[in-house]
Structure formats: C-alpha cells, structure tokens
Image (cartoon, grey):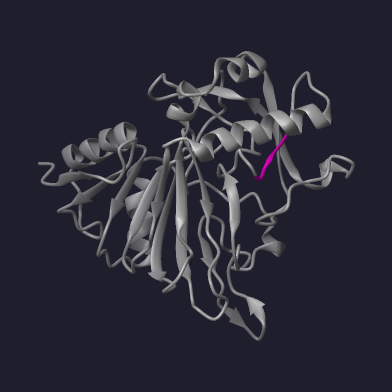
Amino acid sequence: MAGFTLHKLHDSFGAEIRGLDLSAPMDPETCEAVTQAWLDHLILLFRDQDLTPEAQRKFCERFGPLGGRLRKAEDRPEGRDAENIMLVTNVRKNGVPIGSLPDGEMFFHHDKCYAPEPDWGTMLYAMEVTRVGGHTLFANMYDAWETLPNDLKDRIEGRQVLHIYKYLPTERVDLKEDIDKYDHQWQPIVITHPKTGRRALYVNELMSAMIEGYEEDESREIIDRLVENVKSADVIYDHKWQRGDLVMWDNWCTMHARTDFPRDQTRMLRRYTISGQALSA
C-alpha cells in the first residue's frame, strides 16, 4: 500500500511526499508509486527524516544500482573508500575540507553529464543547514526545451554539446587548456529521457563548453543564451533546506545550482546517486 500524499512544490514541477519514513521497510507497491511520482514530478522532497548512511543507501538502492565516483580515489576528501558516498560540506579538519564542494555558490549543472553514462538520480540528505543561503535551485529542463524560442531550437536541434568538469564550483574550463586532464564527454544537446520518452534540454552553465558545428565564441554565446532563457523562465524551484530533508531529483531532465552562504555557518549534506545509461537524442 502506497500510504502517502503528494503536495506540489512549484507550478512547473516538484512534489513533497508526506507520510513515509524512509528508514523503514518499503513494500514493492509503495516503491513503484514513489518511482512514478518521481518520473511525474522530477523532484521529490521528504521532510523530517532521520537517516543513517546505511538507511539512505538502502533507500537509494530501491531505484537502481548506486552510481560511482569518477574522481580519483586519492583526490576524494571523503577518503579512498568513498566509492558511492559524497559529503557536501564546508566542515574542515585541521584546515582541510572533509567533504566535496565546500564553499559558496555553484553554477547550474547536471551531475555527471561529463561521463559516458550520466547518473539517473541524486539523493541529497541534509544533516546540518545554514541559517542564510545555501539553497539549491532546480530547473525543469523539459519545460526549458518546450518554451525555448524557435530560433534557438533551430540552432541546436540535432547537435552535440561537450561537457567538461574541473571540480570547481564556478569556474568553467578554458578550451585552450588540455581538456584531457579533465573528465569530459560529448552528449546530445537535447536528449530523449530513457524512461519517459520526453525531450529535455541537456546544457548547463558550469560544464557545457562547446557545441558541435560552432566555433568557440559562437558556442559560448549560444550556451549563455540557453542558460539565460532557463533562468528567466518560470521553470526554477528554489529549495530552502531544513535539517532532515531528503531531496531526490532526476538528473536527466533537471539541472541544479547552489546559492552562496556565509562561511561561518555549517552546511553538511550527504549524497548518493543512482547509476544511469548513455543518453540519446
């Protein structure tokens, strides 16, 4: 029995699920209902959860195999054994971050779009949150594609985009650099979602570097226009974190960003991902 209720977060997408304890066993019918709600709403919020790493991992695994980390083991702040788990936190020990992406703003991006098989989903659990800032912004990329002006659609239809990530939150790769130093991958600039069949814009502010068939300057101009069009449209949900929140989102049809926050306020979230597959137009 499903036994939960859905409450909209935004006119465009997103829903809060009430009535589920994610640390408790979940029957197949409920899991199927949550999966369908996720596909329908793109982002799901569960408030007031009390999740150990093991409980969060088990909930994540209900939806598929865990996604792995691409970052080299020796470069992971969480340690060499952190194959699936990431701490998103500004906490430091002896001046060294204990997790990833510690401070400040982070531009809009898709998780692991720079990999051959981008993760389908991300689950982020809030253990400590800031009083000010540190929100996560989500954009509905189905609607971003559907509301795109026709002139922009015509310029990108059928093309590929190069995604590159240098593990910095607000710094894009200069294409004059040796990009082989960084994880990178060509992807369709408009994908067909493997599970829904809907089309989604698959370009973002942080990692999208070059569009097939255009020179660097023109690529940058088109990418910037695409991102600005998303930002100006009514397709963004601003999530203000509370302790005990678990948010799961679909990486194939949303992108997300982080707002700035004071360095003297602690922010600690724990992330697992659900593995994905190669994407096609």
Pinpoint residue 150: horizontal percent, then vertical percent. Answer: 56, 15
- State the image quarter where residue 189 is shown: top right
Residue 175 on the magenta segment: no
As displayed, is residue 65 above or below residue 99? above
User: Which residue is at 53% across, 64% downward?
Assistant: 88
Q: Is residue 205 left or right of residue 62?
A: right
Q: What predominant SS class does the magenta segment belong to?
A: strand
Pinpoint residue 81: horizontal percent, then vertical percent. Answer: 58, 64
Pinpoint residue 151: horizontal percent, then vertical percent. Answer: 61, 16
Q: Which quarter of the figure is the C terminus placed in?
A: top right
User: Toward the viewer: 145 or 75?
Assistant: 145
Q: Is residue 214 left or right of residue 99?
A: right
User: Toward the viewer: 129 or 76?
Assistant: 129
Q: Is residue 69 left or right of residue 85?
A: right
User: Which residue is at 55% across, 64% downward?
Assistant: 260
Residue 209 on the magenta segment: yes
User: Which residue is at 43% across, 28% downward?
Assistant: 143
Q: Which quarter of the figure is the N terminus placed in?
A: top left
User: Which residue is at 34% across, 66% downward?
Assistant: 242
Residue span colored magenta:
206-210
As displayed, is residue 78 above or below residue 17? below
